[in-house]
Amino acid sequence: MKTIQSLITGLQGGEFDARLLDVYADQAAVPQQTERYVKALEHFRDRYGEQEVEIYSAPGRSEVGGNHTDHQRGKVLTASVALDNIAVAMPSSDDQIVLESEGYGDIVVDLSVLTPVESEINTSQSLIRGIAAKLKDAGWKIGGFKAYMTGNVPGGSGLSSSAAFEVLVGNIFNGLFNDMQIDPVFIAVASQYAENVFFGKQSGLQDQMASSVGGLNEIDFENNENPKIHKIDVDFASFGHSLCIVDTKGSHADLSDEYSAVPIEMRSVAAKFGKTVLREVDEAEFYENIAKLREELGDRPVLRAIHFFEENKRVDKEAAALESGDFEAFKKLVKASGDSSYKFLQNVYVGRIPEEQGVSIGLAVSEVLLAGKGVCRVHGGGFAGTIQAFVPNEMVPDYKKGIEHVFGDGSCYVFKVRKYGGIKVI
């Protein structure tokens, strides 16, 4: 650990420039991150005085392929991005955690209780308590700490700010008490456990895994406790394209039923074959029984199952196209993924609210702006929120200007893939 003043002096003097460049993969970002880190350190010192501390980081993520496949133990193609949550942290002398989150005040957790607390359902406290419980149960050390967190992963952006928060907490435990020896995969598993069991949200493992492992990865969740991770060592910039995420400003409020219906309907199809999830269902047997499934379940669950089978295969093809350097083939697959989400998965807008179709507008305007030279698709859970576009670099200024004319200044994010997941930065 280093003192706050020594870290501030080092940051302002350029001592950590190479480290920040390595983490954020953008020379232009180094001065911005330097200022951000210094402000976080100064805030921590204003509250706790001069202390010895460490700085941790966990990134947001972008789903590149595999829309709504992870909860069926399928495959995804996912990338961590350069937006992140950072925390200044130090251990405390007791079992109490006090995590101040910028703009939200203190999150206080007493680690003497490591079972779900009913009043904490859907709160940040439940996530911290659940992660601590899972780590301790696996034999890792936990303890109280004081931390100040600031983040630039926007909530509701489809970049998974919640997973970045969870992975950040996991890495604080990892660094302060376990010498960074906990495997990133297990931190992701612990984060999902906290979300499922303590927070009360049934989610797949994609978001936490992408944030924890870092880089661009194909992940196979057939064994959810031990997923297969295949790192893909390519950068979209090397193909002359940029990854853009557009916030269409739709509200996720009152959409829980729509999100929940996707895995519920997919599992209802699996159940007809005596299985838990679609990954366990024989595809040929599914197609042989479509008429009966339509009669018993209705058409939408069948269409969503078709999306799963095709999307799961598409992830392998996308990864292969990237690794072979065939970016045009990759773009065609991205477009096919978006078309499947729109037509079969049906998560682009909510049928009961036809007057609100921001994602549809974003896709339509993007197709006009990109003129067949780039591609776009719904991003993440869908129904409202964000779209993803792969845009030729020379078209990025005009695309950004055109799409922000519709959704407002700052609605289009241009990303670089970050090679690191959750880490101790300094």
Image (cartoon, rainbow, N blue to C red):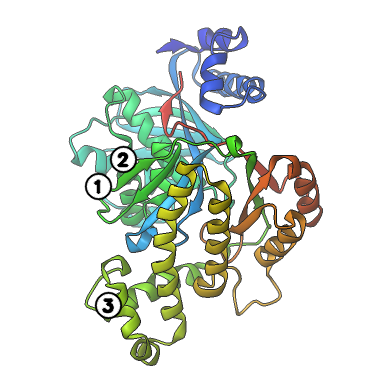
Which residue is more in the foreground, 174 or 362? 362
Check whether the beta carbons of the residues at disc 1 and disc 2 lie within 8 A of each other: yes
Name which residue type carries label 2: Val
- The residue positioned 30% from the left and 68% from the top of the image is 277
Q: Is residue 243 above or below residue 262?
A: above
The number of callouts visible is 3
Q: Residues within 10 Å of mark 2 (few under 14, many from 20)?
A: some
Where residue 360 sits, quadrant-wise, is bottom right
**Residue ID for mark 2:** 185
Q: Secondary structure at mark 1?
A: loop
Q: Residues within 10 Å of mark 3 (few under 14, many from 20)?
A: some
Residue 271's tag is 3
Q: Secondary structure at mark 3?
A: helix
The disc, 1 or 2, on the residue closer to the chain's N-terminal end is 2
**Residue ID for mark 1:** 226
Residue 379 visible in image: no
Name which residue type carries label 3: Ala
Which residue is more in the foreground, 368 or 51? 368
Q: CA distance from mark 1 to mark 2?
A: 8 Å
Instruction: Measuring from the top left, give residue 231's x and y in whole percent.
Output: 39, 39
The disc, 1 or 3, on the residue closer to the chain's N-terminal end is 1
Instruction: Measuring from the top left, give residue 163's x and y in whole percent.
Output: 44, 45
Q: CA distance from mark 1 to mark 3?
A: 24 Å
**What quarter of the picture does the N terminus occupy?**
top left
Which residue is more in the foreground, 198 or 365? 365
Q: CA distance from mark 2 to mark 3?
A: 29 Å
Name which residue type carries label 1: Asn
Instruction: Measuring from the top left, give residue 396's x and y in whole percent.
Output: 73, 43
**What quarter of the picture does the C terminus occupy?**
top left
Q: Residues within 10 Å of mark 1 (few under 14, many from 20)?
A: few
- The residue positioned 64% from the left and 42% from the top of the image is 241
